[in-house]
Image (cartoon, rainbow, N blue to C red):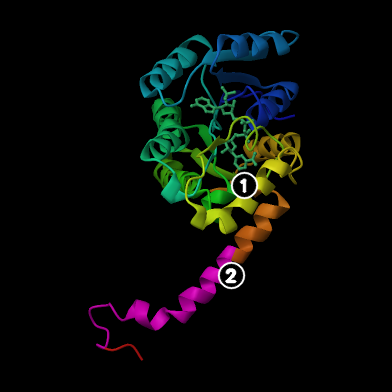
Amino acid sequence: MSASKTFFITGVSSGFGLALAEAAIAAGHRVVGTVRSEEARQAFEAQFSGRPGQAFARLLDVADFAAAERIAAEVESSIGPVDVLVNNAGYGHEGILEESGMDALQRQFDVNVFGAVAVTKSFVPFMRQRRRGHIINITSMGGFITMPGIAYYCGSKFALEGISETLGKELRAFNVFVTAVAPGSFRTDWAGRSMVRSPRSIADYDALFDPIRTTRAERSGKQTGDPRKAAQAMLRLVDSPAPPAHLLLGSDALALVRKKLADMTQELAQWEALTCSTDADAESEPT
Ligand code: NAP
């Protein structure tokens, strides 16, 4: 086993966060996990009461940016240096863009993007000064590929992919790694209790979107991916001396992202002449 590390994982009440906490604690690491209710806090600490000094819970809604900063400082001083930050907390908004309010977009970004950045900014100074750390941002294959009905979610995950990759370049010189982990479809509460669904209101979208919504609800719990295997993969990632900037999880994610990249490569080639026609020294009309 690798040396014991301290993890800070947001959203450990279910899904990936809980699976990773369980796997990390079983492997001998220490985990500080965040939850959103006193009941969940007690449940988390009770689950690991047989592993004293390895599991700690803190209350945090990641959209409360000031609380994130307060908790990071408190954890660093009272529990110890955090080696691995996992920005896992997040949820999916499902809804046709025209039918979904700006408030839903705001909340999606508050949690999935701004919350993750707020938590990250709270730990970066400690990691940079220590010249050590690994930040894992749980994005999604929806940070690479898109489908109708999840524009706000994909937007949030594309944003987190971009921020994550950029931050990795800023922190590389300080021996702090940043990895965006992009899962495919996994058996968590994501498409069940956690999903926020905007109501339908425009019949024009019925044919496109109704089958997508129905299929997603029906497949919840039967997705391809196993979060416990994702947790083991993330422990291997954390052990790597040279972690990647991006890691896909799941064969579905791999196939869909490969297709997206191939389609994009083809589209770039198809429009190459027009693309290059805007250079200052280009001929006036593309050939
Ligand atoms: P999940 O079982 O619903 O777990 C989500 C966790 O995030 C819960 O602990 C939830 O806490 C927490 N959370 C949600 N909003 C929060 C907030 N504002 N502040 C703090 N915590 C919050 O689903 P999951 O699949 O494990 O989701 C984890 C991450 O994986 C998310 O970022 C999700 O977008 C991403 N992801 C999931 C899939 C998939 O197929 N499952 C695929 C790609 C990416 P509560 O219990 O309090 O709600």
The amino acid pointed to by label 1 is Arg
In the image, residue 209 sits, relative to residue 183, either above or below, namely: below
- Would you call the spot at circle 1 few (<14 residues within 10 Å), some (14-19), or many (20 or more)? some
Residue visible at 62% across and 20% down in the picture: 31
* Residue, disc 1: 213
Q: Is residue 262 magenta?
A: yes
Q: Residue at x 65, y 40 (%)?
A: 237
Figure quadrant of residue 263: bottom right
Using residue 245 as the reference point, say whether residue 285 is left or right of it.
Answer: left
Q: Nearer the viewer, residue 9 or 109?
A: 109
| 33 within the magenta span | no
In front of the other: 102 or 107: 102
> First in sequence: mark 1 or mark 2?
1
Magenta stretch: helix, strand or loop mostly: helix
- Report the side of 64 relative to 249 (left or right): left
Dot 2: what SS? helix
Q: Quadrant of ligand 1?
A: top right
Question: What amino acid type should be assigned to the residue bearing mark 2?
Answer: Ala
Distance from disc 1 to disc 2, alpha carbons, whole Å, reads: 27 Å
Residue 282: image location, x then y, percent: 27, 84
User: Looking at the rendered structure, which numbered label has been put on residue 262?
Assistant: 2
| Left or right, 104 with reference to 233 | left
Answer above or below: position of 37 versus 238: above
Q: Is residue 162 above or below residue 233?
A: below
Q: Are marks 1 and 2 in contact (CB under 8 Å)?
A: no
Q: Nearer the viewer, residue 201 or 273?
A: 201
Q: Which stretch appears magenta?
A: 260-284
